[in-house]
Image (cartoon, grey):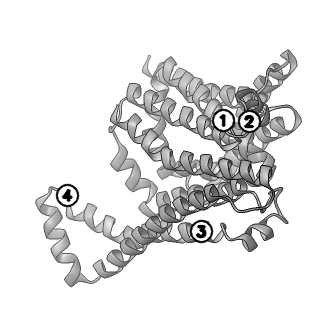
Amino acid sequence: MSQVFSVLVTFLPFIAIIFLANLAERDRLREGAGRSPMAFLAYLMLVLIYGFMALVGITLQGVGLMARNPGAQAPLLELYAQWGIQAEEMEGLLSSLPAVGMALWIPALVGLFLLLPGVRRGVARLLPLDPESPVHAVALAFTMLVVMNLAFTLGIGLDTLSRALAAEETGQEMIGVLWAQQATMAFWGLVGVGWPVRRSLGQALERLGVVPMTWRQLGLGAGLGLASVVGVAGLEAAASAVGLAPSPDVESLTEVLLGPLLTSIPGILTLGLSAALGEETVFRGALQPRFGLVFTSGLFALTHSNYGITLSTGLVFLVGMVFGWLRRRHNTSTAMVAHAVYNMTLGSVVYIYSLVQGG
């Protein structure tokens, strides 16, 4: 339960920011190009959050650099030894601090930079954004959260993370956490496109592309979900044939994060249905019309930080392009079906294989 509460608390400030930005957008559209105090509040909250992250990052980097001095490192090792932390683990943590610090302060400063009107106008030449829109400005700055999460994961190290997270949660706990995370993401997407400030629920769902499907669209989504599984398996086999084996660290961390979900039918259903709800609402529904197919697919791939920057990341990008094409050609609902079928098929293959091996 504490993990679920933590997820909700983490998302709350960013939901509040996009809500304020939508209030400002409503005022802008009603009153012309005048400045809205709601925009100031939204930007102020984002500046405070990113400023705090930047400060923490610079501090961590400084501590990490100082700790490289043996004279400064010895007292820290002695202190953590009293807490039961092994010297080898502590040395690894200290050595990763500079990279972890940079993973926080650099994206945070870039996120603040993206709020500048001149920068937004430059980006709007490349992406279908309205540089005067507070909602688009905030959404653009939010992209740095994806970069920050990935850089933070790489800074700590996939192997270190897999050891730290091992056996922390059971499958049942992970089901609750994943549903909380993805449902909150879907809510974030709804608020992001203007509900309940600028659009009714029906209008917001239509803007997101979450609309009723035809039977043809349902079949197309399911078929492309299955085809994507086959395509990814083929690309992975081809990569292995030329010596590009999957990273052991990626496999280890993925097993820690997803393994408990793949031991039961409810876990596999959660893996597919929750991701279809949350990730598709945000990426294909809310972001793709503003950021375009390729940029959104790139963000989607980088969100899967457990893959680091590997072949697996590229495969997620390609799968995201398939989902994005479905959104562009049909609607987000069809992309949701494809995503759910893709995830559940992969999960079912792993589940059946484990039963065969165990039997």
Q: Point out the image quarter for the N terminus.
A: top left
Of callouts 1 and 4, the N-terminal one:
4
Residue under pointer 4: 85
Q: What is the secondary structure assignment of the residue under circle 3?
A: helix
Quarter holding residue 184: top right
* Mark 4 burial class by Cα count in 10 Å: few <14, some 14-19, many 20+: few
Mark 1–mark 4 Cα distance, whole angstroms, equals 49 Å
Mark 3–mark 4 Cα distance, whole angstroms, equals 37 Å
Disc 2 to disc 1: CB gap under 8 Å: yes
Residue 199 got which mark? Answer: 2
Identified at 53% across, 65% down, the residue is 47
Of callouts 4 and 2, the N-terminal one:
4
Residue under pointer 1: 196
User: Would you place residue 179 above or below residue 286 in this image?
Assistant: above
Residue type at the position of mark 2: Arg
Of callouts 3 and 4, the N-terminal one:
4
Residue type at the position of mark 3: Leu
Identified at 20% across, 84% down, the residue is 71
